[in-house]
Amino acid sequence: MYSSAEQQAIRKDIFRWLDRRLELGAYELTRDELVNYRYGDTPIPLLDRARGIRNPKDFDATLSIMTGVKGTYNDGISDDGFVHYEYQSRDGGDNTKLKRALEQKTGMIYFQGVRPGVYVAHYPVYVVADDTVRRTFLIALEESMRFFGDPLNMTVDERRYAERAVKQRLHQPVFRARVMHAYASTCAVCHLKHAELLDAAHIIEDSALAGLAVVTNGMALCKLHHAAYDRNLMGITPDYEVRINRALLDEIDGPMLRHGLQDMHGTSLVLPARRGDRPSREGLAARWEQFAA
């Protein structure tokens, strides 16, 4: 059994490793990567190969949970903003280590499946309640939600906050991972292929009612073209043609303006290979009206 200090050091190292992957543009992780994590020379798989929970025998408390694949338990994210993780059918085992994570306020990892064998990581997440009636643990994705008075009986304001928090913490990373996969980590305008310099841009902004976090409401855009699109300096027609704001076309400046924006005028958008992943023409038409105005 690792000491408490050693367990804390390992968790911090895992979080640093995940941070580094994000910095390099790796917003999704494969099962092979996760089961082959090493702390120094010691292999410590971050996922269990057969179950949705990882409870290393040398750890006091749960290391990670995973959802997104069909399994025995009815686990998932509720409208209240928490992951609801059902008890193991028998007492002891997984239940004990999740209870210990609650008692010790231990930071864990939540791996959410985006497609078979591929996940996005949310961390640190915390067990904040043990619902003994429904035999379910509540796991907070947003750290501030740890400090709600009673997660099992939230106020109206707490519930509203939780709904917003889960949209930011949960939906956006999954949206990004799916958009990047659909576009093969390539800017749809300029063909840039450095994932760390790309964003998953919304066509209809996510604050709008129709701004769903689905691939057809998104495009992979580099930082420059994402900013230009959001500010209506660049538009995209429903026929997937790039247009640059007329004032910018008439402006004389350095090579970034010329090659980064002016030369893109009239070019065709790079589209996902799968037709079902291509941008919604209805969404593009709505945004095009804003640009044209």
Image: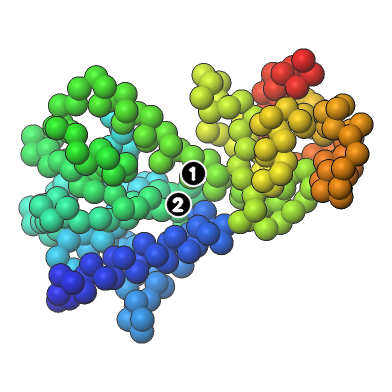
**Percent of width and height locating residue 261:** 82, 41
In this picture, is 129 found above or below 240?
below
Asked whether, in this view, residue 213 is left or right of residue 136, the answer is: right
Q: Quadrant of residue 42?
A: bottom left
- Residue picked out by circle 1: 174
Q: Quadrant of residue 176?
A: top right
Q: CA distance from mark 2 to mark 1?
A: 6 Å
Quadrant, the C terminus: top right
**Percent of width and height locating residue 5:** 18, 72
Mark 2: amino acid:
Val
SS at mark 1 in the image: helix
Task: Residue at 26%, 22% (x, y): give it.
Answer: 157
Task: Residue at 78%, 43% (x, y): give it.
Answer: 189
Mark 2 surroundings within 10 Å by alpha-carbon count, few (fewer than 14), some (14 through 19), many (20 or more): many
Q: Nearer the viewer, residue 101 or 113?
A: 101
- Residue picked out by circle 2: 120
In this picture, is 6 found above or below 216?
below
**Residue 49 visible here:** no
Residue contact at pointers 2 and 1, CB within 8 angstroms: yes
Mark 1 surroundings within 10 Å by alpha-carbon count, few (fewer than 14), some (14 through 19), many (20 or more): many
